[in-house]
Amino acid sequence: MRGAADEAGVSLSTDAALEAFGVPDLGADAPAGAYRWARAVALGGRGRAAAARQILAELVSPASAGAVDPAIASLAYGTRGSLIRQAGEHGRARMSDGRACLIAADRPTASGGGDPWMVAAWLDGVIGLAADNLGVGDFGASRALLRRAEAELAAQESACSTDVNWAIYPRVRLRHAWVSTELALYSGDSAGVADGRALVRSLARDTPSHRHVVKSTLICAAADAASGDPEAAVDAAQWCEKQCGPAGLLPLAWASATMIQGLSPSRMTEVGRVDILGEQLTVLGMPITPAT
């Protein structure tokens, strides 16, 4: 079930792939349903969670079982988990990420000539679970999951060609670096924070997606703050917030404003900025649950 011709009812222009991942297309071997999944990812990046969830629900519906590739069904569950996690409900996100892993669990390994999309789907689910466990304070589980993903990523990167679509392994590698850096931040691993920040910055330089560059910059800003350089962190967070506006990246704008407010309230662009952005996200279906 491969190829853009399967994308009934969805524009096969480059819009979805460009907005979601910064690439002109998802490749000739993109699984059936891939462009609808990309559309959901793009909507989620703008905080339009309700609209994104509708597409994701269609992708995993029993009625779509014969028309949507299992790799995309797995990725759809992983994206659903990401939306739930962005709203602050890490515990509940584990159900969706676990489902993503289950669908892709029987994938062949790299040495067995595994389908890149299915392996990437499994990796996405495992990394999502690592982020979920990080959010609920289970650092040991998060670390074990990241190590498992790292081993598979290394094997896949060794086995695959260098021209693999960025939406597959390069994107997943960046996500792995994000969560690894966050684990170091949460667990007080200063050496891990420094290494993670350097890796994220290195990977971000070759990232075609502006949204992924902004998020990478924000994670590095958090690392700057944890390393004793709050001014650099605020500078970076302000850059991120400015970048979010034209692109409509509401979740990242909210995260940027939250960092600025926490580190240097006097540098907020407007009073109540965090609340305003939070209300906009709530209207779009992504109410933020405050951290406890």
Image (tube, rainbow, N blue to C red):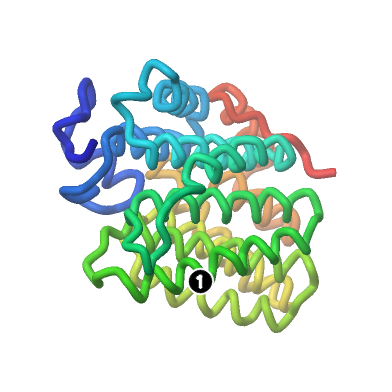
Residue 230, percent across and down? 70, 71
Name the one closer to the observer, 222 or 172: 172
Give the quarter of the image for residue 168.
Answer: bottom left
Give the quarter of the image for residue 85.
Answer: top right
Quarter the N terminus occupies: top left
Secondary structure beneath dot 1 equals helix
Residue flagged by tag 1: what amino acid is it?
Answer: Val
Residue at image x 65%, y 53%?
Answer: 131
Residue at image x 47%, y 58%?
Answer: 214
Does residue 168 show up? yes
Q: Residues within 10 Å of mark 1 (few under 14, many from 20)?
A: many
The residue tagged 1 is: 200
Residue 202, percent across and down? 44, 77
Residue 84, percent across and down? 62, 35
Residue at image x 38%, y 16%?
Answer: 63
Residue 60, percent across and down? 45, 26
Residue at image x 38%, y 62%?
Answer: 169
Give the quarter of the image for residue 146.
Answer: bottom right
Name the one closer to the observer, 164 or 83: 164
Q: Classify 154 as above or below 129.
A: below
Q: Is residue 45 left or right of residue 259?
A: left
